[in-house]
Image (cartoon, grey):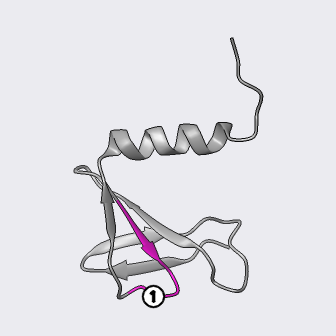
Amino acid sequence: MKKRVVRDGRVFVTSSASNTANACVGVSVEVTGVGVLDTKNPGGDVLEFSRGAFASFLRTASSAGRAPTR
């Protein structure tokens, strides 16, 4: 089940694959960029990324472990 964390007017949403140990991150996609926080410490720092940098991260993470394509 997705969990929502509201902080400073932003809504951070966790993955639906999160486990019950709350060991996940929350992601907030805004016009100006993407914020990521640790749901175990929602009052802690928020890592800020440009939308392009975060999209590149997701592409790389989703292809990890796959054979390279030519």
State the quadrant of the C terminus: top right
Q: What residue appears at the point 25 percent right and 49 percent down from the top-left corner?
A: 31
- Circle 1 sits in a helix, a strand or a loop, which is it? loop
Camera-side residue of 45 and 20: 45
Along the horizontal axis of the image, is 56 left or right of 22?
left
Label 1 environment density (alpha carbons within 10 Å; few <14, some 14–19, many ≥20):
few
Tell me which corner region of the image, top left, top right, bottom left or bottom right, holds residue 28. Answer: bottom left
Along the horizontal axis of the image, is 8 left or right of 39?
left
Give the residues drawn in magenta, as a range. Answer: 35-42
Tell me which corner region of the image, top left, top right, bottom left or bottom right, holds residue 51. Answer: top left
Q: What residue appears at the point 32 percent right and 81 percent down from the top-left corner?
A: 7
State the quadrant of the N terminus: bottom right
> Is 53 above or below relative to 44?
above
Q: What residue appears at the point 47 percent right and 77 percent down from the top-left corner?
A: 38
Q: Position of residue 48 (x, y in %)?
A: 30, 60
Amino acid type of disc 1? Asn
Which residue occupies the extreme top position in the image? 70
Q: What residue appears at the point 22 percent right and 51 percent down from the top-left corner?
A: 32
Q: Position of residue 67 (x, y in %)?
A: 77, 27
Camera-side residue of 67 and 20: 67
Along the horizontal axis of the image, is 21 left or right of 55?
right
**Disc 1 target residue:** 41
How many callouts does the rendering have? 1
Q: Position of residue 58 (x, y in %)?
A: 53, 44
The question of residue 37 being in magenta is answered with: yes
Along the horizontal axis of the image, is 69 left or right of 41?
right
> Is 57 above or below relative to 20?
above
Q: Position of residue 68 (x, y in %)?
A: 71, 23
